[in-house]
């Protein structure tokens, strides 16, 4: 990363199937890259032990979440497994970007489309955002899920979702064909540099 490019804040929006390693990539970028933070998303689910409101998630009741939706406060939100809602507050993205903070987030394909829609209306978002799809060959993905101890039923469900998501990969600005953790991280760093260089002051 060149010094000039590193000074430009970027928003990297990652998506990919379960088992693609996107969460690990986000965590590593925050841990190892200069000035990167994870976007704190919002949810209606109950906090787990050791989770802190505002650090791990913004935890909202169903009524509070409804109010935020009505106010147009979210860049994107969705139901997950028909049980809880998850979303990204505009303030969690736009304010840090405006202050020069680089951000990274992983969402599902639907969430990325909502980010694209928001970017068409918001010049700051459009200028600083890069979307990244983490692609994994189907046979490799099955092996990864099996290695995580997923049940056959869960693997089958996730594979159906993955195949649908793969049909959307051409819409992304960048695609990483997953191989090893080191190669994937190197590819993500290169994308960071590409996005930063393309930002017009």
Image: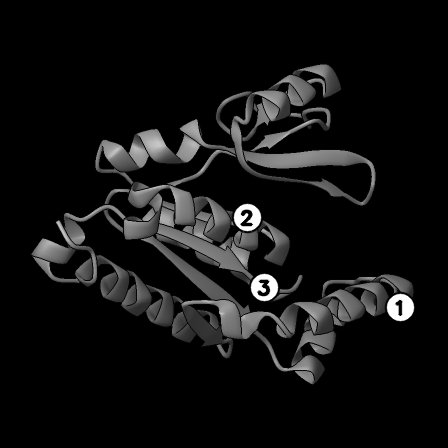
Name the one closer to the observer, 174 or 134: 174
Using the rendered image of the protein, determine whether residue 78 is visible from the camera's viewpoint. Answer: yes
**Which numbered disc, 1 or 3, marks the residue closer to the eye?**
3
Q: Of marks 3 and 2, which one's residue comes earlier in the chain?
A: 3
Q: Position of residue 6 (x, y in %)?
A: 17, 53
Label at residue 114: 2
User: Above or below — where is 187 with respect to 79?
Assistant: below
Toward the front, the furthest residue is 121
Q: Residues within 10 Å of mark 2 (few under 14, many from 20)?
A: some
Which residue reaches farthest left? 4
Compared across the picture, whether 169 is left or right of 142 comes to left
* Rendering coords of residue 181 (x, y %): 46, 69
Residue under numbered circle 1: 152
Q: Residue at x 46, y 44 (%)?
A: 118
Instruction: Kindly identify which numbered label has been placed on residue 16.
Output: 3
Identified at 45% across, 32% down, the residue is: 90
Q: Nearer the viewer, mark 2 or mark 1?
A: 2
Other-residue count near label 1 (Cα within 10 Å), few / some / many at <14 / 14–19 / ≥20: few
Marked residue nearer the N-terminal end (2 or 1): 2
Instruction: For marks 2 and 1, give the CA distance.
Output: 31 Å
Give residue 101's mark: none
Q: Secondary structure at mark 2?
A: helix
Q: Which numbered disc, 3 or 2, marks the residue closer to the eye? A: 2
Q: Is residue 17 above or below residue 41?
A: below
Disc 3/disc 2 C-alpha distance (Å) = 15 Å
- State yes or no: discs 1 and 3 in contact (Cβ < 8 Å): no
């Amino acid at each position: 990363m060149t010094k000039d490019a590193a000074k430009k804040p970027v928003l990297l929006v990652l998506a990919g199937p379960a088992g693609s390693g996107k969460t690990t990539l986000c965590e590593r970028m925050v841990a190892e890259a200069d000035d990167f933070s994870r976007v704190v998303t919002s949810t209606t689910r109950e906090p787990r032990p050791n989770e802190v409101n505002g650090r791990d998630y913004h935890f909202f009741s169903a009524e509070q979440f409804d109010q935020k939706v009505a106010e147009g406060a979210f860049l994107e939100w969705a139901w997950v497994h028909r049980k809880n809602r998850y979303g990204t507050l505009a303030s969690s993205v736009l304010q840090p970007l405006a202050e020069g903070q680089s951000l990274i987030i992983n969402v599902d394909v639907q969430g990325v489309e909502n980010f694209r829609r928001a970017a068409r209306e918001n010049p700051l978002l459009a200028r600083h955002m890069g979307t990244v799809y983490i692609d994994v060959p189907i046979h490799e993905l099955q092996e990864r899920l099996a290695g995580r101890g997923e049940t056959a039923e869960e693997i089958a469900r996730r594979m159906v979702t993955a195949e649908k998501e793969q049909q959307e990969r051409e819409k992304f600005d960048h695609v990483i064909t997953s191989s090893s953790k080191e190669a994937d991280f190197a590819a993500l760093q290169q994308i960071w540099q590409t996005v930063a260089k393309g930002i017009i002051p």
